[in-house]
Image (cartoon, coloured by chain):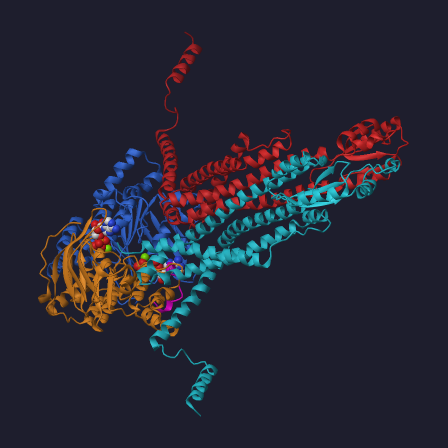
Chain colours: A red, B blue, C cyan, D orange
């Protein structure tokens, strides 16, 4: 058996029997153990603290989770409103009635010209024949139109403008230009309806944006304030530990765990609240969706978003605790 | 072990608590700090434990120049100093056991060792039976003894105590002082602030006398080996209050070899 | 001079010279003075406390005022949305095309019949002549219609259904009934558009309602929690005052003033925030309003509502302080 | 003025702090409570101030049966009792002046009168110069003196003090005790818990001795009129620590008429 084999055998034996960390000196091993133990103790002790005053903890968690879930709810609302706005776009076609003398070929080339414009998304051509058939089936004038000897209808182009959901300003310019084109007899555009819808969407988006911003701020403030209050109430404990020679990490540990617990629990409560709100909104959402014939599905919180919310909450709790302890730790320095 | 060089401390309020203070304490030496209320005893001890920094002069503790200690090394210095606070400073939401265990936890002791050493310390101050009690349910004297157990549990090289017997009866005071003296014997430097002049006298140790922040006397008894057992015995005789026996006990002691050790203090200093 | 005159003169003299409260004994007067002085001192001292830690106070006020103003903002949004919904109602007329053989008198009696229905708000009659004129001016068929010898249009009734803004369900039943009436040729009702709008409004109302509820809860919790934390931090002060023989009212006074100050300041900040939001929303509101040709004015917070918000805030602060002190005061009783 | 009848106190933790305690103090009488640490001295005083209720027996203070006092009348009873707490219990966020003024504010005194009486009280404890200071900037002994000033400022009919001189030097302790004795002379009932047996001896007042919650002695000196001035003088001689002079001072005093007043206490009670 050569040396390499021996080495391998030693390695195998080593991995088979999990020996204690090999080269750390005894006192260092002991300190590592104590360190791990202190983590475990801080973890349990901070949870016990919260459980020890259930009223105060519940209050704090409710405030924190409300502040956390409200921006998410608003964001959901906004996101869905935007999707809704997108779906409403296809009802926004501009009816362009060409002059009666324009023939099919000219109409087609004019349509191609329009299609190359940057502010136009789709151009559909409706021939006079199609127009008459549609008119007959839709309007209440079926009988009246029977008396017509010839088809008096012109070619109609249905132009869908390419605009952002939020801005309703692009359309009027396009409509104006189309109206003054030499091929065009008249432009029909249900401007009132469309402006209203656009305005409503823009208004909602703006309100939701402002509210979400305020609520995000509130979430931060509430978390910070909560952990700060907790720590101010334990200032004596911190200062005694400092006087006994505890370093910053040791003093911080239980508070950071407290922050983590607050964050994790508040995150869970927030997720529950959001689920509750989604259930409460199921009925009107259903109605809204059915009016779109199933083309449009409202989306709730995805798994990824739920995890992001939870992570944000935990991080906020931890960060709040970190900031608040830093302040208190500075007070314990010798002057 | 503890060395003060021309130390001065002026509080931000303008109060000059210490001025031109110089003294040196060897390793394993025990000394008392005496002086009127507001003389600066607590201020002096606070600076040894790096709870405060002097505004002038140099302090060396455990060979470490405190003026040069960076903020992140302050905890290490403090771990080397066991401190009994004048106002106990116990954590009210932890049991007596957990309070005493705190310095060991901070030092990173193993669980089993913590238990053994905490019980030993509690036993020394006579509170082993109350280890599970909450500090609020203890009398003030009992709280002070828990504070003493916390200071000695880590066996620090330097032990400082601010008025450790202020709330204790004479017999218990003597026993606690004997406890401190025992630490001196194992090489610990001990510095105790106290008002109890009778007790200080009987201990026969070095006495630093402060007056309005100035060191007005540094008295070293010639026969410093006055038996500690004798102290405890005389204190027991002294309790309960029996003027006759107390006077006798004291008289005997003075007669029995401490007369020569009378500190040559100048009389008539400061009214507080 | 008889007795009555004398009495009157005495009364006059009394009211002219405001004498000190006449019969209160000296020590009682002194205690009254001390009582008033303690009120004044508590009032000033509580303000000084808040001013003494500006950071913490600002944090608390922000959280409180955010929690206070958000429900109000949502309520405003909801209210305006409802008003908007109401204005959109008049675009909801159902076009009822009567059979060509129906003459004007029959049409009028049919209209009267419809007006008596509980689910109908308004019925307007459009004669064939009015219809043709409107059709000429609106549609792109002006030229085509010129060729018509007679008016082929029937009488049209514009029926506005009477429905709540939130429910879009009532209309289909009415439309169905109208479509099957013997006088009616065809019913034109832009059901899709209307359903969509109704659904959007219902959805928004539900969301706003849920959010407002959550936020109202948050406001209460935040105020309670804030004052509770403040009082827990001053538990020692309370217990010392009780030990020195202060009665409940005396101990409570400074805390109640603190609660009042918090409430008043948070109320002011909330009003400022609302004003800020109103300014931020001015642009989209303008757009929204202009699409209604000024017929519809968005309303902000009225004076009465502003005062109500302020009063609510002050009351919440006071109440929170009262509840929190009660708990602490019970702890000071001898066992 | 203070009357205990078969009073017992058992804490919820099961600790029996007092048992079968009976004694009576007349108006204008001064008495000390002595006893080891944890004997029940603080518990006794807490019940006089209605901070706690006994589990058995009857207590009467100022003619009021405390057992029958309803919760809303507790403040009135407490206003009639001036209390010095063992741990001062000063409000750290108010100035010394405001702390001392607190009882007068609670009693509803006029502004001018408050200022006058607070300054008089601070003058008596030697802290007039520090009236604007924050309590944290005072030494522990100074804080204790502020607590004493707060207790006496309202001139209550009953004055109780828990270890008022625990953090004071001997000279100051004697002065403070003299202050309490002055109150006795104007008809105030004074009850002081103390460990300072030397001082208690010198005061020549009645002493109640507690041991594990039981009253084991109620010693009334025959010649209670030992001059208070003599006490202060002898204390001044006693400071700074000079065993010889102290022993002399004490010896003189004992010889000069207090020998007869030796309390006939049974020796050898309880180790703490
Ligand atoms: N709140 C409490 N709950 C349970 N036990 C208590 C409580 N307060 C005091 N004790 C116990 O009652 C006993 C008497 O306590 P007390 O404070 O009256 O003693 P003391 O004579 O004042 O002692 P010291 O001189 O040390 O202040 C002690 O053993 C103490 O542990
Ligand atoms: N933080 C502070 N700010 C200002 N002055 C202070 C502060 N701490 C103490 N002092 C003052 O410094 C002086 C010395 O205080 P120190 O606490 O050292 O006295 P001491 O000797 O311990 O007295 P005692 O025996 O009463 O405890 C006192 O006059 C005190 O008022
Ligand atoms: Mg001190
Ligand atoms: Mg006590």
Q: Is residue B129 left or right of residue A51?
A: left
Q: Position of residue C6 (x, y in %)?
A: 43, 88
Q: Position of residue C210 (x, y in %)?
A: 53, 42
Count of numbered marks? 0
Q: Residue at x 43, y 91 (%)?
A: C2
Q: For the C terminus of chain C, which image quadrant?
A: bottom left
Q: For the N terminus of chain C, which image quadrant?
A: bottom left
Location of residue D150 (image quadrant): bottom left
Q: Is residue C93 left or right of residue D22?
A: right
C125 or B59, which is in the foreground?
C125
C307 or D53, which is in the foreground?
C307
Location of residue A193 with respect to B245 vertically, above or below: above
Which residues fall within the magenta stretch?
Answer: D127-137
Any part of residue B238 in sight: no
Q: Quadrant of ligand 4?
A: bottom left
Location of residue C5 with respect to A59 vertically, above or below: below
B81 or C123, which is in the foreground?
C123
Question: Residue placed farthest to the top in the image?
Answer: A1
């Amino acid at each position: 058996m050569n040396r390499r084999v021996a080495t391998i055998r030693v390695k195998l034996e080593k991995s088979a029997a999990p020996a204690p960390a090999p080269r750390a000196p005894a006192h260092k091993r002991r300190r590592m153990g104590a360190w791990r133990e202190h983590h475990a103790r801080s973890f349990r002790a901070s949870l016990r603290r919260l459980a020890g005053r259930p009223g105060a903890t519940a209050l704090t968690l409710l405030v924190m989770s409300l502040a956390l879930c409200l921006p998410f709810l608003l964001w959901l609302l906004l996101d869905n409103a935007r999707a809704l706005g997108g779906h409403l776009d296809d009802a926004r076609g501009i009816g362009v009635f060409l002059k009666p003398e324009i023939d099919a070929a000219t109409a087609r080339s004019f349509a191609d010209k329009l299609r190359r414009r940057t502010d136009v998304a789709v151009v559909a051509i409706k021939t006079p024949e199609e127009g008459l058939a549609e008119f007959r089936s839709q309007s209440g004038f079926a009988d009246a139109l029977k008396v017509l000897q010839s088809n008096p209808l012109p070619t109609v182009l249905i132009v869908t403008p390419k605009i952002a959901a939020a801005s309703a300003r692009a359309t009027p310019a396009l409509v104006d230009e189309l109206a003054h084109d030499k091929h065009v007899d008249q432009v029909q555009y249900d401007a009132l309806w469309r402006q209203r819808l656009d305005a409503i969407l823009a208004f909602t988006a703006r309100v939701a944006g402002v509210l979400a911003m305020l609520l995000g701020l509130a979430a931060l403030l509430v978390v910070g304030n909560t952990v700060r209050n907790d720590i101010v109430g334990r200032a004596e404990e911190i200062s005694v530990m400092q006087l006994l020679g505890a370093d910053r990490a040791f003093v911080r540990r239980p508070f950071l765990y407290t922050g983590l617990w607050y964050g994790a629990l508040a995150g869970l409560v927030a997720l529950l609240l959001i689920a509750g709100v989604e259930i409460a909104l199921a009925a009107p959402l259903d109605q809204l969706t059915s009016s779109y014939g199933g083309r449009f599905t409202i989306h709730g919180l995805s798994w990824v978003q739920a995890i992001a919310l939870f992570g944000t909450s935990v991080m906020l709790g931890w960060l709040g605790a970190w900031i608040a302890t830093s302040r208190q730790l500075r007070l314990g320095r010798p002057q | 072990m503890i060395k003060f060089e021309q130390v001065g401390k002026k509080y931000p309020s303008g109060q000059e608590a210490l001025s031109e203070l110089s003294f040196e304490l060897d390793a394993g030496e025990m000394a008392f700090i005496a002086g009127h209320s507001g003389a600066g005893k607590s201020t002096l001890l606070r600076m040894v434990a790096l709870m405060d920094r002097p505004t002038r002069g140099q302090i060396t503790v455990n060979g470490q120049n405190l003026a040069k200690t960076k903020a992140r090394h302050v905890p290490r210095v403090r771990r080397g100093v066991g401190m009994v606070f004048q106002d106990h400073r116990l954590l009210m939401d932890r049991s007596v056991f957990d309070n005493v265990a705190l310095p060991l936890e901070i030092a990173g002791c193993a669980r089993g060792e913590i238990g053994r050493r905490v019980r030993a310390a509690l036993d020394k101050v006579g509170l082993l039976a109350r280890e599970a009690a909450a500090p609020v349910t203890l009398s003030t004297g009992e709280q002070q003894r828990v504070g003493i157990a916390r200071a000695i549990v880590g066996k620090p090289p330097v032990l400082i105590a601010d008025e450790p017997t202020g709330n204790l009866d004479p017999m218990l005071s003597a026993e606690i002082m004997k406890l401190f003296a025992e630490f001196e014997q194992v090489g610990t430097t001990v510095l105790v602030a106290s008002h109890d002049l009778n007790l200080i006298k009987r201990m026969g140790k070095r006495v630093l006398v402060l007056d309005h922040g100035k060191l007005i006397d540094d008295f070293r008894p010639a026969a410093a080996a006055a038996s500690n057992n004798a102290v405890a015995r005389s204190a027991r005789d002294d309790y309960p209050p029996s003027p006759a026996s107390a006077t006798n006990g004291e008289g005997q002691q003075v007669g029995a070899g401490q007369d020569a050790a009378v500190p040559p203090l100048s009389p008539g200093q400061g009214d507080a």
